Image (cartoon, grey):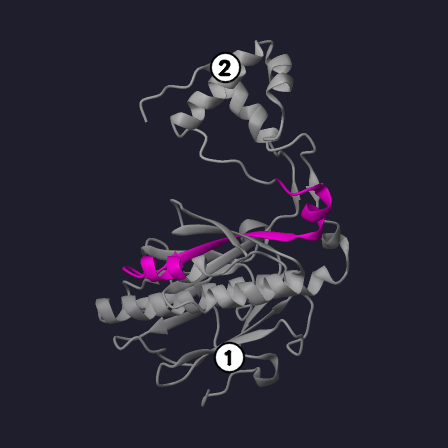
Amino acid sequence: MDYRLDDIDRQLLRLLHMNARASTAHLARQMNLARTTVVARIARLEQESVIAGYGVRLGERMEQAAVRAYCGIRVQPKMAPSVMQSLNRLVEVEEVSAVSGQYDYMVFVRCESNEKLDALLDRIGLIDGIQQTYTSVVLSRKIDRRGADSEAVLAALAAPSFTPLMEGWRVRQATEALQSTIFYARSEAIKRGGNVAIQKLPNNTGGCTTATTNQAWDCGWFVCADTNGNGACNAGEPELRRYESPGNIEVSRTGGGASIKLNRWGLVDGTWLGFSLVPLNKPTTNAAARGVCMSSGGRIRVIPPQDIPCTGST
């Protein structure tokens, strides 16, 4: 596009963004211009494809009734096209953007209820090619240049029924992160011929104060190159990957302690791997609880509350 916007164009676009149905006479009064000038400017912006079309902005009632969220996704190499096709078929997905940082894409979704959002996130997580997801629910919109009434607060978030959903999201995020960490550590161990360890982050990391025992991994964990082969991450050993917990969640290792040693085959060297993940101060029978298990043969899977804790045959 060779057409260059000036300050008048930008002001006009801002006003149209706020109300695309505003009359040219109204726009002219707001901009202190002649109506014919505004008409000519709009025609030129449309001709130059600066304005591609006009849309609908939902009213406050619709905004408050909706549950919105941003979902960061990490995609396997060469799987992006098929993942985009799958996301495009989900009518609740309003926008997908490629981003820099920890995740490959940021997906904006809108659902009619908490339950439908929960189901949608499960469907996204099951799309072939998606390695990891992380969801942030929109609590309120503080600035919205699309309209004068900029703040649309989701009243449903204050309701007690929302708490279990938030708990489930936190557990799901930590569960996916733990799975991803184990797969990554196994891959590194095979590549390096062993000498890789996973270790809990110490208590008070990132404001977390509940990881007071060796079995409490509440604050998160990290993967290191275990250069001295002692099965732990010591000072000076390279940190390969790190995950800090989202908080308000208990991550307990079943057996074992503060670190996990992986051998040259990518298997746990010692006590078999088992974790339970539950909302803070909730039992493992809680509906949101999950277990992450690794069998002696290297099989990793997530188990529901009724199957916690992991067993050696899991």
Q: What element carries label 1?
A: loop
Q: Residue furthest right?
A: 159
Q: Are marks 2 and 1 in contact (CB under 8 Å)?
A: no
Region of the chain picked out in magenta, as a range: 57-85
Determine the residue positioned at 65% across, 36% down: 142
Q: Considering the image in quadrants, where does the N terminus appear?
A: top left
Q: Is residue 79 rendered magenta in the image?
A: yes
Mark 2: few, some, or many residues within 10 Å (few <14, many ≥20)? Answer: few
Asked if one can make out residue 284 in the rendered structure from this viewpoint, the answer is: yes
Q: Using residue 236 as the reference point, say whether residue 173 is left or right of it.
A: right
Determine the residue positioned at 56% across, 82% down: 309
Residue under pointer 1 = 255
Pinpoint residue 18: horizontal percent, then vertical percent: 61, 29
Q: Is mark 2 on a helix, strand or loop?
A: helix
Residue under pointer 2 = 8
**Viewer-proximal residue among 42 and 80:** 42
**Viewer-proximal residue among 106 and 272:** 106
Observer-side mark, 2 or 1, equals: 2
Asked if one can make out residue 211 in the rendered structure from this viewpoint, the answer is: no
